[in-house]
Amino acid sequence: MMLRSAFTVLCLAVVFLWKATAFAQPIPNFDLPLLDRAGTLSLADVKGKVVYLDFWASWCGPCAVSLPELEKLRRRFHPQGFEVVAINLDNSQEDARRFLRDKQISYPILFDRQQRTPEQFGVAGMPTAFLLDRQGRLRETHTGFKPGDTEKLTKMIQQLLQEEGS
């Protein structure tokens, strides 16, 4: 019994240290072209904001659900310092533009023609997103998108927006 308790405490300590280390990891910077207008955007351009960095593609079913939900979150929290930055991973810009035609998305969508950022960020599934605090630290990784995720994301975003110094 005592051995089991010690093991449980050790496991909790490892999880705590892993999370603390994960939050301290530097996030790779990028400078990518905007999909729908001239110019580029980098992480430095959104410094000081809580950022939801979303990797998506037109062939991804859950992405069709997530993009409009992310638009709602952005509209709600943008005045408080929240931004969504989406990186499209299609092979063709036209595929991405066609997919977006009937969606009203106001947040910046970038196109990674060389497909370097998914490797830099360790993207394993679609969509994958990274929630960053105001200091640019990784606070949460989110893979996939299903009903109920918007509510969970809302709580996490609210918490990060309220944190002092984050």
Image: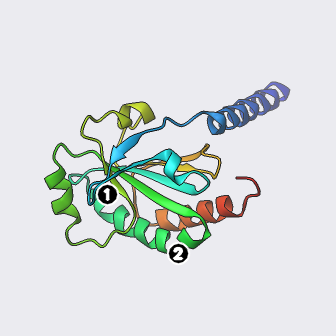
**Residue at (49, 35) in percent of width and height:** 28
Residue 25 position (above or below residue 63): above
Q: CA distance from mark 2 to mark 1?
A: 20 Å
Residue corresponding to mark 1: 63
**Which x, y percent locates residue 132?**
57, 49
72 displayed left or right of 58: right
Query: In the image shown, does 150 or 107 lie closer to the viewer?
Result: 107
**Residue at (29, 36) in percent of width and height:** 115
- Contact check, label 2 and label 1, Cβ < 8 Å: no
74 displayed left or right of 132: left
Residue type, mark 2 in image: Arg
**Residue at (48, 62) in percent of width and height:** 149
Q: Of tags 2 and 1, which is closer to the observer?
A: 2
Residue 18 position (above or below residue 68): above
Is residue 96 among the parts visible in the rendering?
yes
Q: In the picture, which quadrant includes the N terminus?
A: top right
Residue type, mark 1 in image: Cys
Residue 106 position (above or below residue 61): below
| Nearest to N terminus: mark 2 or mark 1 | 1
